Amino acid sequence: MSGNITFTMIKPMAMRNGAGGAILKMIQDGGFEIIALKMKQMSKSDAEEFYGIHKDKPFYENLVEFMTSGPIIAAVLKKDNAVEDYRKLLGSTNPETAEEGTIRRAFATNMTMNAAHGSDSDENAIIETKFHFKDDEIFN
Ligand code: ATP
Ligand code: MG
């Protein structure tokens, strides 16, 4: 599955705002096939591991606290060039500079509560997919 999948999470504030369905629709309208999907609440240790690359950053604790504050939707998306194309659909990390028509422009609250996550490489897409889904939960 290398090269044509990416992993996304719809973050807790977007879920609290009732935007989960609308974001999934933007994903499908953007040409992505949803090949795995679940709603779950991450534990503190899950979030610490998932965002471990940021553990020395000043926003890390706040990010972990936020990401465990309520349920998320986790999904695996399939499309040619999935990682890059999905990051385009997400828009920039800071929603104030996210382009019109992007998920973050439409649904982000601020930099931390920026509506959704997207993998940043094919390698991380696979690592993040395996972190959240067993093989028999992926319909590839
Ligand atoms: P994501 O990994 O969630 O798709 P990203 O790849 O655009 O986002 P990263 O640099 O990987 O951005 O940062 C991970 C997450 O950490 C961001 O989505 C955001 O929620 C939070 N974050 C990043 N930078 C900041 C910051 N300067 N202040 C507050 N939160 C931040
Ligand atoms: Mg990232």
Image (spheres, helix red, strand yellow):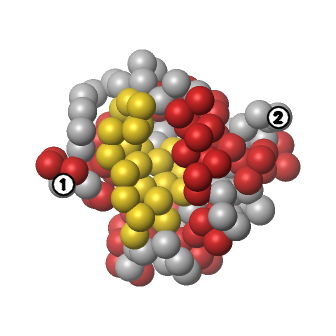
Q: Is residue 98 above or below residue 133?
A: above
> For mark 2, does the 10 Å Cα neighbourhood hold few (<14), some (14 to 19), or many (20 or more) residues?
few
Quarter-of-image position of residue 50: bottom left
Q: Give coordinates of residue 46: x percent, y percent.
A: 36, 72
Q: Give coordinates of residue 72: x percent, y percent.
A: 49, 65
In terms of depth relative to the viewer, which is nearer, 69 or 30?
30
Q: Which amino acid does label 2 sit on?
A: Glu
Q: Is residue 38 above or below residue 7?
A: below
**Figure quadrant of the C terminus:** top left
**Figure quadrant of the N terminus:** top left
- Badge 2 element: loop
> For mark 1, does the 10 Å Cα neighbourhood hold few (<14), some (14 to 19), or many (20 or more) residues?
few
Q: Give coordinates of residue 76: x percent, y percent.
A: 37, 43
In terms of depth relative to the viewer, which is nearer, 43 or 103?
103
Q: What residue would you read off at disc 2?
A: 100
Q: Residue at x 72, y 37 (%)?
A: 102
Q: Earlier in the sequence, mark 1 or mark 2?
A: 2
Q: What residue would you read off at disc 1?
A: 134
In terms of depth relative to the viewer, which is nearer, 96 or 136?
136
Q: Is residue 90 visible?
A: yes
Q: What residue type is labelled 1?
A: Lys
Q: Which residue is drawn at 77% across and 34% down?
A: 101
Q: Can residue 125 be seen in this view?
A: no
Q: Is residue 75 above or below residue 73?
A: above
